């Protein structure tokens, strides 16, 4: 998981690409003639709610392999300054041994006992002191690697200024002092507080019989706590603050810059239009083909003026908020001009985006969404994430219909609400002296009209 993604839901672990839970049934070779028929023939996602509150969700595709995993509605959003990094630490500890199994045992057993393994991990993790100390060193080395990745560094700073003083402003890995001081008791306390059955989803995809998985869940997770000894933990409200962080270092050859506005949560009606707007801006780097005939207007401008090395628009969603913006890498002498081109494209989205722009982006978005669900593991991850974000898995044909319903007016209205004349958050690292000051960037987000 990227360091700058801070889901309210934490993916614990899955066991994937293992023999199916049943004898596979094979689908015939008949080719479906239309995209609509393909979407309608996707197997349904079945959902069961156990008495404990634990949810079991599956998509049975008849595949010869299966993926099963646990998703828990917790993570860095539920951490404090003192234990920031504990959720990520527990992710490292997940497969380091339980009271019944060694680390080697966990890595060798497969699907007939996959659910029992997951239940053993979540309920009986040994959290041995030697393993904790070993993983402490692993995480500290991971932090060093992350700090050498300037994209990760920029997004960390972007979150820190966009969501100042809130959990989303912290990193997932946590500060070094926390990693060095977190104890076994800190890990145990976090598990006892947050690992409750109503906040857990057991998801399965591929050759998975739903009723069989439900029976396995009832058997192996029956000891999982569902009551709270303290008030139910709630996510803090993460307010957005327009502000900036500039870390000038002229020894770095290129400037790495991110500019973002407050986006929306997963369930917000503006999410789909902003996804389309994000796709219109697109992404590009110098290794891509297309030249001046690239479909993205911003890519055309960057290529013709040799203004940047790469850029990518992003739409990062959390449960209740998000970040919508752009990250780009360029020479110090072209920063000002490329920021001007970005302004031009954002105002185009807010005022003049055309139906042809939107239709092209919708087709790209629909294609990408389908390509991302290639295999049992991404499907299982999609089930777990959507169950925690929406309380259900949105059928592909419904999602496709939502995308199809977006038009130029919808995109303009959504972008006007979230981009036009709004205060951005800015993070920049490297030779950034030529980056316009904050007020100049802010003033470029609206037009004076006579």
Image (cartoon, grey):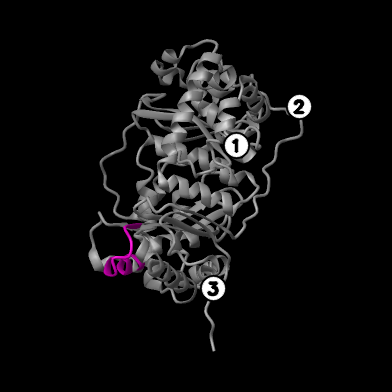
Region rendered in magenta: 298-310
Q: First in sequence: mark 1 or mark 2?
A: 1
Q: First in sequence: mark 3 or mark 1?
A: 1
Cβ atoms under marks 1 and 2 closer than 8 Å? no
- Neighbourhood count class around disc 2 (C-alpha, 10 Å): few under 14, some 14–19, many 20 upward: few
Q: First in sequence: mark 3 or mark 2?
A: 2
Residue at left 49%, top 61%?
Answer: 274
- Neighbourhood count class around disc 3 (C-alpha, 10 Å): few under 14, some 14–19, many 20 upward: few
Query: In which quadrant of the rendered image does the N terminus lie?
Result: top left
SS assignment at label 2: loop
* Numbered circle sitting on residue 286: none
Compared across the picture, whether 111 is left or right of 54 comes to left
SS assignment at label 3: helix
Residue at left 60%, top 37%?
Answer: 73
Q: Position of residue 4 (x, y in %)?
A: 49, 44
Residue at left 44%, top 56%?
Answer: 257
SS assignment at label 1: loop
Q: Which residue is mark 2?
A: 229
Q: Nearer the viewer, residue 213 or 378?
A: 378
Residue 366 visible in the shown view: yes
In whole angstroms, how far apart are the C-alphas of marks 3 and 2? 51 Å
Q: Which residue is mark 3?
A: 443
In whole angstroms, how far apart are the C-alphas of marks 1 and 2? 18 Å
Residue 366 position by quadrant: bottom left
* Numbered circle sitting on residue 73: 1
Q: Position of residue 318 (x, y in %)?
A: 56, 48
- Neighbourhood count class around disc 1 (C-alpha, 10 Å): few under 14, some 14–19, many 20 upward: many
């Amino acid at each position: 998981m990227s360091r700058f993604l801070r889901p309210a839901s934490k993916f614990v672990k899955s066991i994937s690409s293992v023999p199916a839970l049943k004898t596979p049934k094979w689908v015939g070779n008949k080719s479906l003639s239309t995209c609509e028929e393909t979407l309608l023939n996707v197997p349904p996602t079945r959902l069961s709610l156990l008495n404990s509150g634990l949810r079991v969700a599956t998509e049975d595709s008849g595949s010869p392999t299966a993926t099963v995993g646990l998703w828990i509605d917790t993570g860095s959003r539920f951490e404090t300054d003192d234990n920031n990094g504990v959720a990520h630490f527990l992710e490292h500890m997940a497969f380091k041994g339980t009271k019944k199994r060694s680390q080697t045992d966990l890595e060798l057993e497969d699907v007939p006992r996959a659910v029992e393994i997951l239940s053993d991990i979540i309920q009986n993790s040994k959290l041995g002191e030697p393993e904790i100390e070993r993983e402490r060193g692993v995480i500290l080395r991971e932090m060093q690697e992350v700090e050498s990745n300037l994209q990760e560094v920029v997004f960390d700073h972007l979150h820190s200024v966009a969501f100042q003083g809130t959990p989303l402003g912290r990193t997932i890995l946590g500060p070094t002092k926390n990693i060095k001081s977190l104890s076994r008791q800190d890990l145990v306390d976090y598990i006892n507080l947050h690992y409750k059955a109503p906040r857990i989803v057991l998801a399965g995809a591929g050759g998975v019989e739903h009723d069989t998985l439900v029976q396995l869940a009832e058997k192996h997770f029956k000891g999982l706590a569902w009551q709270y000894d303290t008030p139910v933990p709630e996510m803090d409200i993460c307010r957005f603050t327009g502000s900036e962080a500039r870390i000038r270092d002229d020894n770095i050859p290129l400037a790495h810059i991110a500019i973002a506005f407050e986006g929306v949560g997963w369930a917000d009606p503006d999410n789909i239009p902003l996804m389309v707007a994000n796709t219109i801006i697109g992404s590009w780097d110098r290794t891509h083909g297309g030249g001046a005939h690239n479909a993205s207007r911003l890519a055309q401008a960057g290529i013709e003026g040799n203004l940047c090395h790469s850029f990518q628009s992003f739409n990062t969603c959390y449960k209740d908020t998000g970040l919508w913006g752009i990250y780009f890498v360029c020479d110090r002498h072209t920063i000002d001009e490329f920021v001007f081109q970005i302004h031009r494209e954002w105002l185009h989205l807010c005022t003049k985006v055309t139906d042809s722009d939107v239709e092209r982006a919708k087709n790209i978005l629909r294609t990408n969404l389908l390509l991302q669900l290639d295999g049992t593991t991404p499907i299982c991850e999609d089930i777990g994430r959507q169950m925690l974000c929406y309380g259900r898995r949105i059928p592909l044909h419904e999602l496709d219909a939502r995308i199809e319903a977006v038009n130029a007016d919808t995109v303009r209205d959504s972008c006007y609400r979230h981009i036009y004349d709004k205060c951005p958050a800015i993070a920049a690292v490297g030779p950034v002296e030529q980056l316009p000051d904050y007020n100049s960037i802010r003033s470029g987000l609206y037009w004076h009209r006579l």
